[in-house]
Image (cartoon, helix red, strand yellow):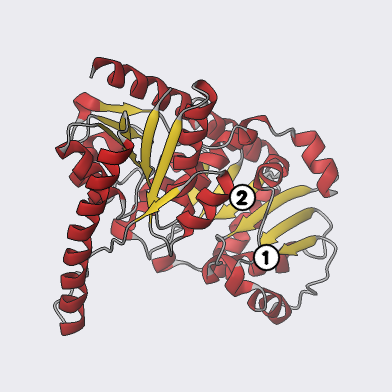
């Protein structure tokens, strides 16, 4: 039986891999006890509760890089929050007595893994991005184990002697979803299925490109497009379609706010249009689907671009950077790709080759080995 503390916060891209690791531990060692650490006001509270794990909350913040009075005041508060978090985490570790502490990203991982290391507990970090964030690079110096998503991340983490390339842990359903059954359930038929999404909130650029692409195919009957608008695109996307002369009720376009069954939609798709978040790319690879990627520019150190390039370099994706994006040209290229089904199939095969089938299992085994050495 393992006792583990897992810290993750901020976005589903940090929290969902953490839950996948927790699920693997529970599957391997029933009766294990796992405590999550995160912000009470963050997404982690909702996701961990849904998964059935308790959450111990601490308050942490990043630091502003500017020198304005408001930036300085924010950073002073962050320092006090970090100090308070270290104290709370120390008490948690003493009371819970974990075999291991795992940081899966977000600012919350910093004080948790740092304090555990100071107290002699086995520590690990799981980095999701090809270009690791500041927190992971800092913790890499102290953690006993580092789990990386790809070979590209290893030199950037700076500790190759204790870094293991395992990929990103995702739900097993992405590897197992049946394409024929998924296409039948969605009513795709013989059409090329294009799945487009920009995250739970929605990305204006993805919505715009997806609407422009819809204007190319809506009257052909050759393409079936499933588009997730995200929260901010519910009203915006239909309006964009109308601007392009497309009826939002067109039978060749299915519009939803959020995709609940992503694994079935990915299994059915011939091509994906999306941002380049690490977990989304891992799911795309597991599903063996070609992709057109538009990395978000609003992330630390442009890490989504580096994520995307791992698939591009494998011949599994094409990437367009937002800073010089021509919406019409991208829409034309996507339309061209839909007419090259052999190319899409080969890109999908290349994507599948990038998938790590047993990331959570490999993380569990390495953790168990390290704990046994303690």
Q: Earlier in the sequence, mark 2 or mark 1?
A: 1
Residue 44 position in % (x across, y down): 46, 54
Q: Which residue is disc 2 drawn over?
A: 272
- Left or right of 95 in this view: 329: right
Residue at image point 38% right, 30% down: 3
Nearer-the-camera pick, 318 or 264: 264
Q: CA distance from mark 2 to mark 1?
A: 16 Å
Residue 7 position in % (x across, y down): 36, 46
**Image height of 339 relative to 208, above or below:** above
Where does the N terminus fall, quadrant-wise? top left
**Residue at the extreme front:** 95
Q: Which residue is disc 1 drawn over?
A: 257
Residue at image point 18% right, 46% down: 138
Q: Is any atom of residue 147 visible in this view?
A: yes
Nearer-the-camera pick, 244 or 228: 228
Residue at image point 22% right, 74% down: 74
Residue 189 position in % (x across, y down): 86, 45
Q: Is any atom of residue 315 visible in this view?
A: no
Where does the C terminus fall, quadrant-wise? top left
Residue at image point 64% right, 69% down: 212
Describe the element under mark 1 as helix, strand or loop. Answer: loop
Which of discs 2 and 1 lies nearer the camera? The answer is 1
Quadrant of residue 251 in the image? bottom right
Nearer-the-camera pick, 158 or 275: 158
Q: How many circles with numbers are drawn on the protein? A: 2
**Image height of 176 relative to 281, above or below:** above
């Amino acid at each position: 039986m393992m006792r583990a503390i897992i810290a993750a916060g901020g976005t589903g891209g940090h929290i969902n891999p953490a839950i996948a690791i927790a699920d693997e531990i529970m599957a391997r060692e029933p009766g294990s006890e796992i405590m999550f650490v995160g912000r009470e006001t963050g997404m982690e509270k909702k996701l961990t509760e849904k998964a059935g794990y308790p959450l111990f909350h601490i308050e942490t913040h990043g630091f502003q890089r500017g020198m304005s009075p408001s930036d300085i005041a924010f950073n002073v508060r962050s320092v006090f929050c970090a100090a308070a978090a270290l104290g709370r985490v120390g008490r948690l570790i003493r009371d819970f007595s974990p075999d291991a502490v795992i940081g899966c990203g977000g600012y919350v991982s910093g004080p948790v893994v740092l304090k555990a290391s100071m107290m002699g507990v086995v520590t690990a970090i799981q980095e999701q991005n090809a270009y690791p964030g500041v927190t992971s690079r800092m913790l890499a110096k102290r953690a006993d184990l580092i789990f990386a998503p790809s070979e590209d991340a290893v030199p950037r983490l700076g500790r190759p002697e204790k870094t293991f390339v395992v990929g990103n842990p995702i739900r097993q359903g992405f590897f197992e979803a049946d394409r024929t059954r998924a296409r039948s359930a969605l009513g795709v038929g013989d059409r090329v299925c294009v799945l487009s999404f920009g995250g739970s909130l929605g990305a204006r650029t993805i919505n715009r490109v997806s609407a422009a692409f819809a204007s190319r195919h809506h009257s052909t009957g050759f393409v079936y497009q499933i588009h997730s608008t995200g929260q901010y695109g519910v009203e915006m996307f239909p309006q964009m379609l109308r601007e392009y002369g497309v009826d939002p009720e067109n039978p060749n376009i299915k519009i939803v706010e959020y995709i609940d069954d992503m694994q079935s939609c990915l299994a059915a798709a011939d091509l994906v249009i999306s941002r380049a978040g690490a977990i989304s790319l891992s799911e795309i690879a597991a599903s063996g689907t070609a992709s057109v990627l538009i990395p978000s520019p609003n992330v630390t150190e442009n890490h989504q671009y580096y994520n995307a390039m791992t698939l591009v370099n494998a011949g599994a994706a094409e990437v367009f950077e937002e800073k010089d994006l021509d919406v019409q040209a991208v829409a034309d290229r996507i339309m061209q790709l839909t007419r090259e089904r052999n190319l899409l199939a080969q890109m999908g095969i290349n994507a599948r080759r990038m998938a790590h089938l047993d990331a959570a299992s490999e993380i569990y085994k390495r953790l168990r080995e390290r704990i046994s050495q303690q």
